[in-house]
Image (cartoon, rainbow, N blue to C red):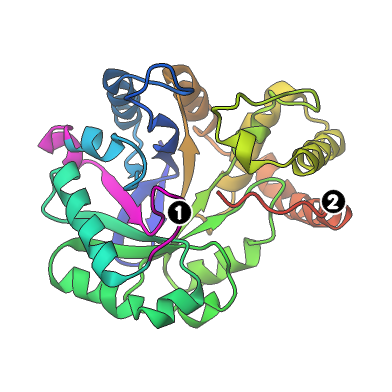
Amino acid sequence: MIRGSFGKTLPKVSKIGLGLSQLSNTRKKLLYGYKTRKEVLSIIRLGIKNGINFFDTGNNYGDTENILGNLTNKEKSKIIISTKAGLKKNGKRSFLPSYLEKQVDISLKNLQLERINLFMLNKPSIKDISRNDLIYFLEKLKKKGKIQKSGIIIGDKKGFKKIINSQTLDCFSVLFNLIHTENVHLIKEIYHSKKGVIVRSPLNSGLLNGKFNQKSRFHRGDQRYKIFSKIDYVNKIKRIDLIKKKFDLQSKNLLNYSLRFILNNNHVSTTLIGCSSIRQLREVILCAEKPTKKNRKNFREILDFSEKISKIFKANPQSY
């Protein structure tokens, strides 16, 4: 697995990171997406075996923190575990330092770590950061030895340029994929500030895997059933179809193309992929092995075309 730099003070990370949100249901067999803890552990270990060393979990990702905690110390020494807090189980957000530190303590216990490798705030606004003095809070967590590095998942990016150069913050997570390229300049700015760049939703919640069309429907238990409005979904598929036509892509090649588009952006440290099965993970690993010169050459052309069709379809970016 190819590895790249992750800011100026962090170790090199695999260009593909494993996001564990899709593996959060290990308790309710009758609900959509159920996996046994053994299955989840097998997916994680397959990732480690294939050189993936960045794993993203969270306080609301079911038992995944606990499952990562059950890895051996040798396995944990080979990987970077990132967890997050700020989004509560009821869907509301809280950035009160007392609440966040309590979540950090719970994560430390679940992960069976003395110190969290990377702790992320889950989409605070710039007002949340200022109101709760969150930069100072993160620095205190470092001084207490509870976290090694800190970062922010950017939702509403308004005002974030003010804090990108903060010495306390080590990385940022940004939405970026083949049909949502509007954050390309933000990614570049973060990179030049010598901070890590984590790309989330590289396949736009799976829509860029080549298996969806206008007639596709999501299971009611699938989180995408709630995320995508009908018009938003239709517009996204239309945008994908235009890209396929423009660049002469078959559906079976879309996953490969989508991933390599991001992997060829040298400003990106790691890209979080959500895999719910061994088969999916193997497919992603195969795609990520070697970025092609052709994709590097076409990167600017793809950005320009994506921006052009964005003006045609005013769908809201998927920001999960």
Question: Which type of secondary structure does the marked residue at label 2 adopt?
Answer: loop
The residue that label 1 is drawn on is 269
Does label 1 or label 2 sit earlier along the sequence? 1
Amino acid at the residue labelled 2 = Phe
At label 1, counting other C-alpha atoms closer than 10 Å, the crowd grade (few under 14, some 14-19, many 20 or more) is many
x and y percentages locating residue 70 in the rendered image: 16, 32
Residue at image point 34% right, 54% down? 84
Find out whether residue 77 is within the magenta segment.
yes
Does residue 204 appear in this view? no
Residue at image point 83% right, 31% down? 248
Please tell me the numbered disc located at residue 106: none
Residue at image point 58% right, 66% down? 156
Residue 113 horizontal side relative to residue 50, left or right: left
Amino acid at the residue labelled 1 = Ser
x and y percentages locating residue 93 in the rendered image: 43, 60
The residue that label 2 is drawn on is 313
Residue 186 horizontal side relative to residue 99, left or right: right
At label 2, counting other C-alpha atoms closer than 10 Å, the crowd grade (few under 14, some 14-19, many 20 or more) is some
Find out whether residue 255 is within the magenta segment.
no
Residue 231 horizontal side relative to residue 138, left or right: right
- Front residue (pair 141, 291): 141
Residue at image point 15% right, 73% down? 143
The mark tally for this picture is 2
Q: Quadrant of residue 208?
A: top right
x and y percentages locating residue 115 in the rendered image: 15, 56
Distance Cα–Cα, label 1 vs label 2: 29 Å
Residue 33 drawn above or below residue 65: above
Q: Quadrant of residue 52?
A: top left
x and y percentages locating residue 45 in the rendered image: 28, 26
Nearer to us of marks 1 and 2 is 2
Residue 267 horizontal side relative to residue 74, left or right: right
Q: Which residues are magenta?
A: 70-94
